[in-house]
Amino acid sequence: MTSIAILFSILAAVLIGAVSPGPSFVLVSRIAVSRSRRAGLAAAFGMGTGSVIFATLALFGLSALLMQVEWLYLALKVAGGLYLIYIGIRIWRSAAEDLAIDAPASPDGGSVWRNYGFALGTQLSNPKTAIFYGSIFVALLPAQPAFWLLVALPPAVFAVEVGWYTIVTIAFSSNRPRALYLGSKLWIDRVAGVVMGALGARLVAEGLPRHLWR
């Protein structure tokens, strides 16, 4: 298989992983529909940044380290799960708050960076992402990949992740989804909070010693 074919195979696998519903999708779609398109794009870039970090670390062998040092992997799972639970609680608590629909159209710089940071933190909260990238690279990269391929992979991963979440942002920041959200904000936010918290609780449960569940 040529290096170009390998690159496109990896990017196809990354796209499939990005499209799969999870905490990243929940967060970006909620930011886009409840705040603004600009805020959603900031979150999309946060997701892309987190993916690049994990992809780069996977290329340097972090995934192998996590698979070898079990306690570190489990500790990262618990920490990431607690972060997602925290985000879920914040979404739930803000569900009853009125949304100032005029304000998000031009959010200030702090708001944009806050959305970026939330998205980045959510993406980095799940160490499974590092294992995901490591597994793809182990399965598809040759033993001695071309140097240009190693250099091209992180920005290509960034482009795929940002591209997907930009599509999500555009879809959910349109008038019809926003009108639906405004009409059912309380329950939509509570469902989003429960989903985020449940995903976090699952990570915590997977990270705690198994004997605690027996």
Image (tube, rainbow, N blue to C red):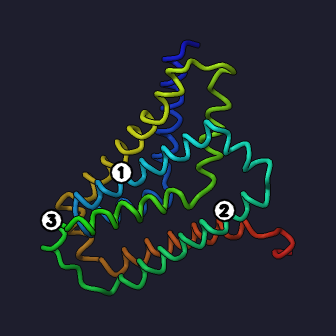
Q: Is residue 113 left or right of residue 1?
A: left
Query: Residue at coordinates 49% horizontally, 21% vertically from top-left?
Result: 148
* Farthest residue, direction top: 2
Where does the image place residue 36, in percent across and percent down from the top left? Answer: 22, 63
Check residue 76 in the rendering and tell me which mark sits there, or answer none: 2
Secondary structure beneath label 3: loop
Secondary structure beneath label 1: helix
Give the Cα separation between the discs numbered 2 and 3: 36 Å
Where does the image place residue 95, in percent across and percent down from the top left? Answer: 35, 82
Check residue 201 in the rendering and tell me which mark sits there, or answer none: none
Q: Is residue 176 left or right of residue 30?
A: left
Where does the image place residue 4, in percent across and percent down from the top left? Answer: 48, 17
**Among the two numbered marks 3 and 1 on one chain, the one whose residue lies closer to the N terminus:** 1
Q: Which residue is mark 1?
A: 45
Question: Which quadrant of the rendered structure holds the N terminus?
Answer: top right
Q: Is residue 101 left or right of residue 145?
A: left
